[in-house]
Amino acid sequence: MSTPNGFPQHSRVCLTRSMEGGAVQDLQAKKAGKAAKKEAGGDGAPPKIGTPISETLKLLPEELKANMKIKSITPRPPRKPRLERAASLDEKSWRKWRRFRTSQESLTDPNETSSSNGSLQEASPSPPTRGRASPCNPCCQQDSSHSSPDALEASPGGKSRGGASDLGKRASEISSAFGGLLRGKGFAGGKPRLSQIMPARPLPPMELNVASHSLRTANRIDSDCLDYRQYPQHKFGRVSSSLSDSRLQGNGTLCDNGSTDSMKSTFSVLTPIRAKDVRSRSYLEGSLLASGALMGAEELSRYFPNRNMGIFVATWNMQGQKELPANLDDFLLPTDPDFAQDMYVIGVQEGCPDRREWEIRLQETLGPHYVLLHSAAHGVLYMSVFIRRDLIWFCSEVEYATVTTRIVSQIKTKGALGISFTFFGTSFLFITSHFTSGDSKVNERKLDYNKTIQALTLPKNVPDTNPYRSSSSDVTTRFDEVFWFGDFNFRLNKDRETVDSILNQNPDTDVSKLLVYDQLTSEMSRGSIFKGFQEADIHFRPSYKFDIGKDSYDTTSKQRTPSYTDRVVFRSRYKDDIQAVKYSSCPVIKTSDHRPVFALFRVKVRPGRDNIPLAAGLFDRDLYLIGIRRRATRELLKRREQKDQRSSSICSIS
């Protein structure tokens, strides 16, 4: 007969046998006597559902009573604790066991051979442990938490499948699990202790260099850039919901932080693109400011985390000289600051006869990190725009226009040349000009300026980024960032003797006394020219007029007054978008009567739209190859000369 608690009545004797000491045996005898008296009274009705355990233990059949008399209890030494087991049960496992214990179907269904809880299943049923629980702490044995329900089942009709001894074995296993809990000793040690989780198999060894070979190759730093400062990796990392780093880890690809940020695909170092994204939009048109857009904020933050780029702007009147400087490093790559810029724009007035040779020299100096985005010419006015090759994909189509300021339009020695394009979402306009010369021709120079802003027809196909702030009568209002540079020919309104005395008193950088007589500074303060433009502070000597090949100003009979004719000015639609970093001249280049003047800027860049006509990565490839070949040849010749000097050196002994 089974009790409502799910165990046979005669198995309760075996439960009480597992208790400690002789007092437990006395309790068994008393309960057996009470059960015999109740049987003699003829009350064979099963106990009610609400019967407590103490009343259930009283119901002992005659068979068990006889078995108790035959078999005696032999004390056994305690078993050695199993080290792989936990010292105590946690509360969660105990609750699962209680639910299992009170489930009538699991205990009464003879065909059920597995537990409903996955944590109680085993690959093969282990034989029940023979004997009763250890007299030490009963909670040290955890066999019951992994035992099969077959050991707990009762046969139909209230009879056990085996003899009383088998029932005793099974009951002793159960009693070892919750016997201590019935006596209130299950959690005497405070918080339950959990078993140590050990891996099923040893972990595979990990290489010291976890980056793949292809990734190491892609991330290799050029030898001439090894001394560059390394920026924090998280600043350049791009976060995208389409990337799955966990998938890389699961496929066995071992990635550190740098690898995870760079390698988002198991096939290449490029970022994977979802097929649905390719179907839904075009990367050349559409996807206005959407996530993943080519010109969008996500891509912009990847290349410019602070959204500031460096621009080098230079102007030089070459005086039509055929001879070019032997070295342009001091001009294009000044030692201050330490890093090269993202974009180089060079305007030339009265350029050399061989324009192509000049561009090759520029490419040779800037090296393989830069490509010629566009170049244009208007007579002897040249302009070249170089950009880092990594950024070539984010430029729109490049447009240019020219203006002639001379009365005879065929003579193209004076005028203006403008180049415009959009980089991400910021539109740029670069203008180089050569205004009318002459100390007293200020009004003619202002007319040249007004004609340029009205006649320069830009932009053409590339849309205006902010048409509501544009004016049809002023080209400089139709772009976000405007840089105007060239030989403006504005002079100092002072005689030569006074200017020379000021220069002799302040030979270095204090030229504030000279700027008081500067025509351009005076006209800009009145607003008659370069409206809305700014100029960085001048801390260099006048760039005109020098004797060719010398550091002295004009020593001819004309005795021209030194002046700041070569200038760089700028304006922006938005306040503080352009920050001047450096404004100086290059005194080491002496092939002309003008010294080159350059300026370094930090320019804020905004995200853009993909619906603009893009340049599609076009650049002057032939110029690039010629310039790099010359650079390599020059380096080989330099090394050969150094080798020859070492081999031909003679050691003399005095």
Image (tube, helix red, strand yellow):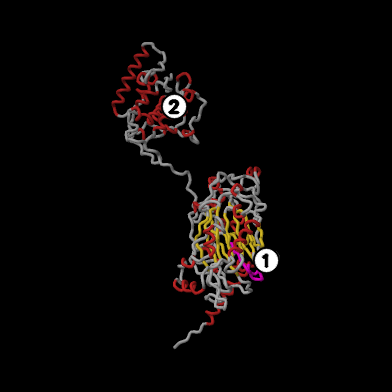
Residue 512 part of the magenta segment: no
Q: Secondary structure at mark 2?
A: helix
Q: Quadrant of the N terminus?
A: top left
Where's residue 575, x and y in %?
51, 52
Q: What residue is disc 2 on?
A: 99
In-front residue for pair 126/507: 507
353 relative to 169 in the view: left or right: right
Count up the numbered dots: 2
Q: What residue is disc 1 on?
A: 412
Residue 382 in view here: yes
Where's residue 338, x and y in %?
49, 63
- Residues marked 2 and 1 touching at CB (< 8 Å): no
274 relative to 112 in the view: left or right: right
In-front residue for pair 81/212: 212
Above-or-below relation of 552 to 187 = below
Where's residue 64, x and y in %?
38, 21
Q: Which residues are magenta?
A: 345-358
Where's residue 567, x and y in %?
55, 64
Residue 65 in view here: no
Q: Earlier in the sequence, mark 2 or mark 1?
A: 2
In the rendered structure, which amino acid carries the disc numbered 1?
Lys
208 relative to 453 in the view: left or right: left
- At label 2, counting other C-alpha atoms closer than 10 Å, the crowd grade (few under 14, some 14-19, many 20 or more) is few
